[in-house]
Image (cartoon, coloured by chain):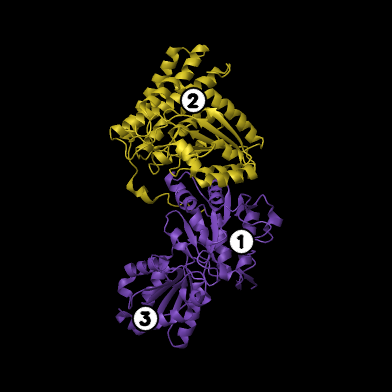
Chain colours: A yellow, B purple
């Protein structure tokens, strides 16, 4: 890890813990799918943990994020708990959205998560509008818009970046480039440079190693602080990797990427392993302590899954509740 | 009572609500100094500044999406969509995002925004600036849809829309912007889901929306001269729909024509006619008839355009057939 040593051990351990929580959450979600206990399907965030955690650790609770179909990582990183998340994945009443949203729509407004979005690129306007609200209403909130490399092909992104730049909005566009747009290599769908597209609007754009949580967090801290001073918007391209297929059912994927490539990322560029190694080298935590953190998280996840499996479904009378908010 | 134009009524509604609530702002193309191509918003930027009357680039999906996000985070945006035809450009943000956010989040997120746009043919604007597309959005659960039929309704419904905690789409007929109607000086609101009986009658019910209310009223006058008593009802909002008032009228008159400027097939007229048939079947003496715009793209030539939309003469002729019993055997 190239990042400079720091003294704030608590922050580092929280980042490690949050990354491990995301990985463990996804391992459990994957098992629920494979054992046919989860309705529908889901998209795993495993491999990309340093992106969500590095950025969300630079945010306050009142700062906002918008998320994607691959959104469990953002949700955990912004403060959500396992129990309500697993309940939502299983369509249970105690889920974050009372079972009405499921994996692709978890919203956790109390923690500033304006929701995952199952339309690729669909939340870019929402994030930009959230930043407009903050600026207009005199709040110092920053909004981070998470999206994948695939979403850079959507026209909406360019419309809203244009307006964000014209109006100097406190929004950070965080492009998680995991190399694949569904089942297609990114270099087949993205012409030219992704960061240059933001730069064309006069938006400062950065590229960062999305597997290095400290590098991501350092950059995010700086940009969030500058956003609060009215210097936004910003754009970050985070180079990362998706360990699973496009979704949990995308098992046989050698036609679009090799096992050797997957193995290379998992073995040599895993964000959790490499950060754990660095923590041990710096004397911030021993291997045993890190292992204990992992075990605690696993126990927490197991308990949450068990709880969610036996939790009750929403009563059928809820089917037409929440179509409309009360008028006033 | 003073009379003002529909355009002025809209302007007043926005100004009053913006004075009342700091979180309300207007966003759209050429809304500030230009006051929109129809000059509806003229003067607002002088009072409220460019911070609250926000000019955007020509990017309808972009500013629609921005409004959704602003609405989720404490603002009450009024989106100005210059032509109803541009709805096709904003459909994802309106129907997949705004309409569903409250439901998908289990009631956590609210999207209190108003999308003001227009409708109406016979302005010689051809097929991409003349459509009446309210049925498209009325089909989507989560959206409310208002259709003012005069300056009075335009003001009262818009004020209610701005205060509502849901996404509301308001369709103003662009040919009525200069039409005047009595509008009180003092504040008033018109609740959603309450139809207005414009004219009482006993022989046939004419249910009409937006500018078609004028068409129905003219038809009712022609019919009155012939001894046919027509009741004219304006639902004012099609979502929510005041079904009770419509059913009560049809149970009394036993006949109904539904008149609306959307294309006739799969439209608002079909929905209302179907509900009346399902719920007042044994009271009917004739089939409930739909009269909408022809199922053609709106043509440019005046010679063609004028025959695509319902007219008072056409409505009166249909009413005569229904009242005389000839329509029953028409097939």
Q: Nearer the viewer, mark 3 or mark 1?
A: 3
* Callouts 2 and 3 in the same chain: no
Identity of the residue drawn at 49% across and 27% down = A50
Is residue B193 visible to the viewer in this orientation of the structure?
Answer: no
Q: Is residue B29 left or right of residue B249?
A: right
Tell me which chain the residue with mark 2 is part of: A
In-front residue for pair B308/B33: B308
Identity of the residue drawn at 42% across and 12% down = A288
Disc 2 to disc 3, C-alpha distance? 74 Å
Q: Which residue is mark 3?
A: B322
* Helix, strand or loop under label 1: helix
Q: Is residue A306 left or right of residue A122?
A: left
Tell me which chain the residue with mark 3 is part of: B
Tell me which chain the residue with mark 1 is part of: B
- Badge 3 crowding class, 10 Å Cα cut-off, few under 14, some 14 to 19, many 20 or more, is many
Is residue B277 visible to the viewer in this orientation of the structure?
Answer: yes
- Badge 2 crowding class, 10 Å Cα cut-off, few under 14, some 14 to 19, many 20 or more, is many
Q: Which mark is residue A211?
A: 2
- Vertical placement of B180 versus A111: above or below? below
- Badge 1 crowding class, 10 Å Cα cut-off, few under 14, some 14 to 19, many 20 or more, is many
Q: Which mark is residue B13?
A: 1
The answer to the question of whether label 2 and label 1 lie on touching residues, with beta carbons closer than 8 A, is: no
Residue found farthest to the bottom = B226
In-front residue for pair A3/B49: A3
User: N-terminal of the two: label 3 or label 1?
Assistant: 1
């Amino acid at each position: 890890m190239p990042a400079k040593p720091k003294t704030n051990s608590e922050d580092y351990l929280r980042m490690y813990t949050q990354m491990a929580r995301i990985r463990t959450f996804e391992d459990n979600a994957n098992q629920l799918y494979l054992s046919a206990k989860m309705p529908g399907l889901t998209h795993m965030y495993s491999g990309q943990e340093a992106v969500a955690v590095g950025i969300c650790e630079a945010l306050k609770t009142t700062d906002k994020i918008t998320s994607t179909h691959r959104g469990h990582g953002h949700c955990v990183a912004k403060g959500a708990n396992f129990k309500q998340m697993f309940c939502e994945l299983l369509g249970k009443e105690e889920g974050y959205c009372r079972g009405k949203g499921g994996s692709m729509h978890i919203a956790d407004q109390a923690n500033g998560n304006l929701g995952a979005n199952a339309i690729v690129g669909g939340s870019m306007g929402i994030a930009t509008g959230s930043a407009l609200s903050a600026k207009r209403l005199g709040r110092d909130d920053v909004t981070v818009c998470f999206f994948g490399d695939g979403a850079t092909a959507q026209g909406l992104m360019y419309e809203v970046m244009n307006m964000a730049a014209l109006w100097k909005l406190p929004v950070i566009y965080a492009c998680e480039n995991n190399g694949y747009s569904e089942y297609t290599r990114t270099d087949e769908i993205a012409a030219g440079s992704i960061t240059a597209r933001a730069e064309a609007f006069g938006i400062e754009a950065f590229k960062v190693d999305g597997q290095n949580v400290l590098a991501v967090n350092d950059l995010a801290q700086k940009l969030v602080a500058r956003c609060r001073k009215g210097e936004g918007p910003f754009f970050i391209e985070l180079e990362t990797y998706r360990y699973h297929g496009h979704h949990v059912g995308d098992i046989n994927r050698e036609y679009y990427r090799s096992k050797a490539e997957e193995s290379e990322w998992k073995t040599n560029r895993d964000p959790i392993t490499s950060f754990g190694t660095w923590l041990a080298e710096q004397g911030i935590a021993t291997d045993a302590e890190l292992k204990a953190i992992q075990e605690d998280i696993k126990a927490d996840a197991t308990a949450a899954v068990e709880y969610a499996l036996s939790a009750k479904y929403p009563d059928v009378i809820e089917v037409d509740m929440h179509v409309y908010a009360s008028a006033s | 009572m003073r009379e003002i134009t529909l355009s002025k009524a809209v302007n007043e509604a926005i100004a009053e609500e913006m004075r009342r609530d700091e979180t309300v702002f207007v966003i759209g193309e050429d809304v500030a100094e230009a006051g929109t191509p129809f000059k509806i918003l003229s003067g607002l930027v002088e009072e409220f500044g460019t911070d609250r009357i926000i000019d955007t680039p020509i990017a309808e999906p972009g500013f629609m999406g921005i409004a959704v996000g602003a609405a989720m985070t404490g603002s009450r945006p009024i989106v100005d969509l210059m032509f109803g035809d541009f709805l096709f450009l904003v459909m994802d943000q309106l129907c997949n995002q705004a309409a569903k956010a409250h439901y998908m989040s289990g009631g956590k997120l609210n999207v209190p925004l108003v999308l003001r746009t227009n409708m109406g043919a016979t302005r010689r604007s051809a097929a991409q600036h003349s459509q009446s597309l309210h049925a498209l959005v009325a089909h989507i659960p989560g959206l409310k849809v208002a259709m003012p039929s005069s300056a009075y309704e335009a003001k009262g419904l818009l004020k209610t829309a701005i205060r509502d905690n849901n996404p509301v789409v308001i369709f103003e007929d662009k040919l009525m912007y200069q039409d005047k109607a009595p509008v009180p000086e003092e504040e008033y609101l018109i609740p959603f889901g309450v139809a207005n009986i414009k004219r009482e009658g006993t022989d046939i019910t004419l249910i009409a929306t937006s500018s078609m209310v004028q068409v129905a009223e003219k038809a009712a006058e022609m019919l009155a001269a012939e001894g046919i008593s027509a009741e004219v009802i304006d639902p004012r909002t099609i979502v929510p729909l005041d079904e009770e008032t419509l059913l009560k009228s049809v149970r009394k008159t036993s006949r109904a024509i539904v008149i609306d400027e959307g294309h006739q097939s799969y439209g608002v007229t079909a929905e209302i006619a179907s509900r009346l048939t399902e719920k007042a079947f044994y009271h009917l003496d004739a089939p409930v008839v739909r009269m909408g715009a022809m199922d053609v793209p709106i043509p440019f030539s005046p010679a063609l355009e004028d025959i695509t939309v319902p007219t008072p003469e056409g409505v009166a002729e249909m009413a005569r057939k229904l009242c005389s019993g000839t329509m029953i055997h028409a097939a």
